[in-house]
């Protein structure tokens, strides 16, 4: 079962930063936070993952709170093509645990 | 980067027929693949975990005789929907875990196929 809580939808103006929150208050020590997104009628796309340090790649930044009970995915300059459902998932990185998707956040990027 | 090919991308069939969906990892070996289904405006629901050379593990409530999964090689898993009925109409998505990343922090990074839309008339 999904162990994360996300707002159902968010709006963001094109060119502005999109900050998507995720609550994972029951996360355990071995579990990483993963973010994926799903553009309409496509398979999900991996974005980023992290354990406790903040992470950045070419797509986004991931900020994890010190107690690891929540995180924020940041898209620094949202474009219309970033409109999608964003899923936050917690899973043990080393034990090949199953991946359960929650309900995600529908991000609407508006011109 | 890792690529997963899923085929067919869409299929329409008559009620009572069986439909096979293929999931291939194109440039990596996948010891584990997952099958999901997704209804309109809903999230992905995990159906089963497929491990190469062994029987699939099905989630509670998923009929193993209805949804046959075969993972005969490190690059191919198939899902067969047997005796399909209109209620089986859905978006089916597979994902694969890169065996090269096993044991490291990237071990749980999944690559997803584009999905297969099944419509049963």
Image (spheres, coloured by chain):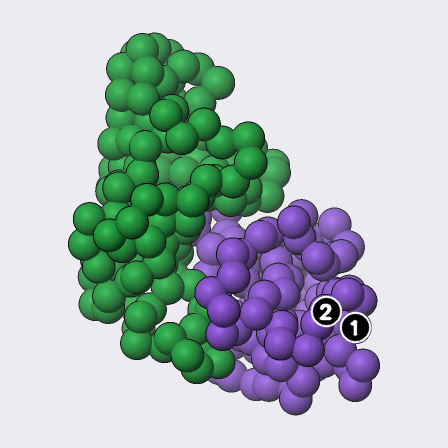
x, y percentage for residue A66?
79, 85
x, y percentage for residue B53?
24, 52
x, y percentage for residue A72?
72, 73
Q: In percent of the image, x 79 and y 73: which residue is there?
A: A69
Colour used to depict chain A in the structure image: purple
**Residue B104 appearing in the image:** yes
x, y percentage for residue A13?
70, 65
Farthest residue toward the front?
B54
Q: Helix or strand or loop: what does disc 2 sit on? A: loop
Marks 1 and 2 belong to one chain: yes
Residue B119: image quadrant is top left
Colour used to depict chain B in the structure image: green
**Residue B10 appearing in the image:** no
**Disc 2 residue crowd, few under 14, some 14–19, many 20+, Cα 10 Å:** some
- All told, the count of numbered labels is 2
Residue B33: image quadrant is bottom left
**Which residue was labeled with disc 1?**
A69
Is the N terminus of chain B in the top left, top right, bottom left or bottom right quadrant? Answer: bottom left
User: Do callouts 1 and 2 mark residues in contact (Cβ within 8 Å)?
Assistant: yes
Gap in Å between the C-alphas at discs 1 and 2? 7 Å
Does B80 sit left or right of A40 as displayed?
left
Does B111 sit left or right of B27 as displayed?
right
Q: Nearer the viewer, residue B15 or A57?
A: B15
Is the C terminus of chain B in the top left, top right, bottom left or bottom right quadrant? Answer: top left
Q: In percent of the image, x 62 and y 72: which residue is there?
A: A31
Farthest residue toward the bottom?
A53
**Which residue was labeled with disc 2?**
A27
**Label ID, residue A6:** none
């Amino acid at each position: 079962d999904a162990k994360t809580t996300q707002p159902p939808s968010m709006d963001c103006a094109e060119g502005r930063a999109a900050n998507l929150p995720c609550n994972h208050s029951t996360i355990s020590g071995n579990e990483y936070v993963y973010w994926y997104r799903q553009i309409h009628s496509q398979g999900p796309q991996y974005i980023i993952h992290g354990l406790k340090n903040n992470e950045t790649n070419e797509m986004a930044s991931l900020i994890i709170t010190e107690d690891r009970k929540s995180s924020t995915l940041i898209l620094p300059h949202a474009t219309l093509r970033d409109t999608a459902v964003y899923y936050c998932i917690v899973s043990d990185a080393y034990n090949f645990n199953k991946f359960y998707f929650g309900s995600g956040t529908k991000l609407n990027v508006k011109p | 980067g890792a690529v997963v090919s899923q085929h067919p991308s869409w299929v329409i069939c008559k009620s009572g027929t069986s439909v096979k969906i293929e999931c291939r990892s194109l440039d990596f070996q996948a010891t584990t693949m997952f099958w999901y289904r997704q209804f309109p405006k809903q999230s992905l629901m995990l159906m089963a975990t497929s491990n190469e050379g062994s029987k699939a593990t099905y989630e509670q409530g998923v009929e193993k005789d209805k949804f046959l999964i075969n993972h005969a090689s490190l690059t191919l898993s198939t899902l067969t929907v047997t005796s399909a009925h209109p209620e089986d109409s859905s978006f089916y998505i597979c994902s694969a875990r890169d065996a090269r990343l096993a044991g490291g922090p990237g071990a749980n990074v999944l690559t997803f196929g584009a999905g297969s839309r099944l419509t049963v008339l």
